[in-house]
Image (spheres, helix red, strand yellow):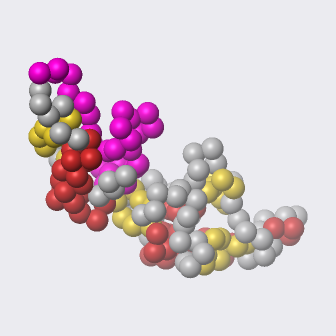
Amino acid sequence: MKTGLTAAQLKEFLEYDPITGLFVWIKTAPNKTQFLGKVAGNRAETGYITIKLLGTIYLAHRLAWLYMTGKWPDHHIDHRNRRRDDNEWLNLRRGGYCANAQNRPAKEGTQFGLKGVFLVNDRFRRKPFAAKIGANGKTHYLGYFETPEDAHEAYCEAAKKFHGEYARTA
């Protein structure tokens, strides 16, 4: 994302607290003094905090990156705890699209509520549960298992191997 806003301009209007993840107005546009000292931003429908500054709406986690590093991120910013409104500095990390996707919870409505587990539609199979994981642009099948919990355990081990610190198993 290219933008004309610099870290110096950002710091002229807002102060960021890396411990709370909140931005506070320290200067506002003319006739808007009611915002001075107040927490900036609104929660969007997506769950992210947005802040309107100089006529443009920004995602607060990207502003936090700019504030702390002095540069706009040239990558995705991942929230370690998966809470899109938690912009504490230690909760933010650099991540590509794939790494960001690994930090998502199991999809709503999954058959067993366990990531990577599915039921094999073969009534003759003695181990009816299977596990799979996506990594490096491919689907890796991890085997067949007697219980969904055993299949999920295989998924968890593979997630650590393929995704390292970005592995999310729940």
**Is 114 one of the magenta-colored residues?**
yes
On screen, 13 above or below 78? below
Could you tell me how many numbered marks the image carries? Answer: 0
Q: With 23 as the anchor, is 76 left or right in this view?
A: left
Toward which corner of the image does residue 127 lie, by quadrant? top left
Q: Main secondary structure of the magenta part?
A: loop
Residue 9 visible: no
Toward which corner of the image does residue 162 lie, by quadrant? bottom left
Please provide the residue range marked out in magenta: 96-124
Locate residue 51, reporting x and y percent: 65, 58
Residue 152 visible: yes
Locate residue 166, reporting x and y percent: 31, 60
On screen, 27 above or below 96? below
Q: With 103 as the anchor, is 84 left or right in this view?
A: right
- In the image, 124 versus 156, the foreground residue is 124
Locate residue 164, reporting x and y percent: 23, 63
Q: Residue at left 57%, top 53%?
A: 48
On screen, 108 above or below 165? above
Locate residue 30, reporting x and y percent: 83, 66
Q: Residue at left 55%, top 64%?
A: 86
- In the image, 94 versus 158, the foreground residue is 158
